[in-house]
Amino acid sequence: MVKISVLLLFLISIVPVLKAQTGIDHLINDTFGEEVRNIYEYYTHQQGKTSQIFNGPEYIPADINIKGHPFFEQKTLQSGVVKYDGNFYDHIKMRFDIYRNELAIVHYDEKEHFSLIRLSNQKINSFGFNGHRFMRLIKEENKGLSATGFYEILYNGNLKVLAKRVKKVKPTTERPYRYEFYNDSKLFIYKDGIFHHIGSKNMLSNLLDDEKKVIRRVRRRKKDGFENYVVRVCNYYEELKQGKGQ
């Protein structure tokens, strides 16, 4: 109890410092900084199943008559970390429903019965699993964003490349289904304090028009998806800028 009480006092003391920082750089660092995360992890491991994260409504699965699944990447449970209402929780089993924009986590009751609960979006600061990092951004606080929600961080330099992961449904002729899920993710680059939607090579070229040779030198590889290509272009763009001392 003494160790936990001391740790609580320390956490309370650093919260104002974290909240005082501004800008997306600080937001990402505060969200995924290892030192702060490790401190919170120690505390939440002491709490165990009494943690506030394990309180929430039941997660209701999507209609089974829709072909495919509504989750990001795969429907199997992933082990990851969640920053929830300011606290970190590690080794959490989760699924990210990108059709309804909901994060579902595993909860075991006193009898070790398994269930999925839905976390409150407003309390989720960030989460990550399987090498993917997501953070919640509010449209009104971030110029250029299309919607409030969770954005995956694909590249974190002076430029930021973020993806809004979305699935939608459309009619299908494949029996026995009437509808199927399809991906409708959108890519954004954070530059000069504004998020810019990037949906094509031309849009990328126009955004980085001060270094047009970047687009010509970075060729899109056969196995490169558009997202990986954009990340490589942004990385090379920043290397050029740094080489010029800008």
Image (tube, rainbow, N blue to C red):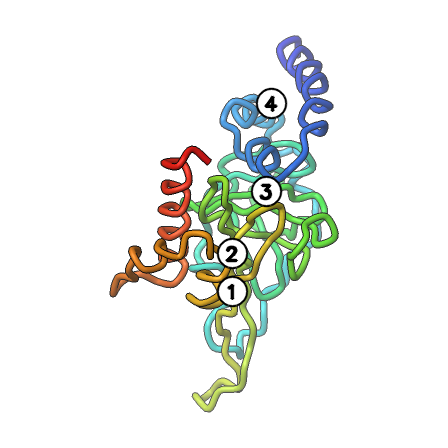
| Amino acid tagged 2 | Ala
Q: Which residue is mark 4?
A: 43
Depth check, front residue: 135 or 225: 225
Tell me the CA gap for discs 4 and 1. Answer: 36 Å
Whichever of labels 2 and 4 marks the residue nearer the N terminus, that label is 4
| Nearest to viewer (mark 4 / mark 3) | 3
State the mark number for residue 163: 2
| Rendered position, 154 above or below 18 | below
Tag on residue 185?
1
Instruction: Tell me if I can see residue 148 in this picture.
Output: yes
Q: Position of residue 51 (x, y in %)?
A: 66, 33
- Disc 1 vs disc 3: which is toward the camera? 1
Q: Is residue 106 visible?
A: no
| Residue under the image location 51 percent in, 64 percent down | 185
Q: Mark 4 against mark 1, which lies toward the viewer?
A: 1
Q: Are marks 2 and 4 in contact (CB under 8 Å)?
A: no
Q: Determine the secondary structure under disc 3.
A: strand
- Amino acid marked by disc 4: Tyr
State the separation of the CA atoms marked 1 and 2: 7 Å
Whether tag 1 and tag 2 are in contact, CB under 8 A, the answer is yes
**Residue assigned mark 3:** 126
Q: Tag 2 or tag 3, which sits nearer the N-term?
A: 3
Element class at badge 2: strand
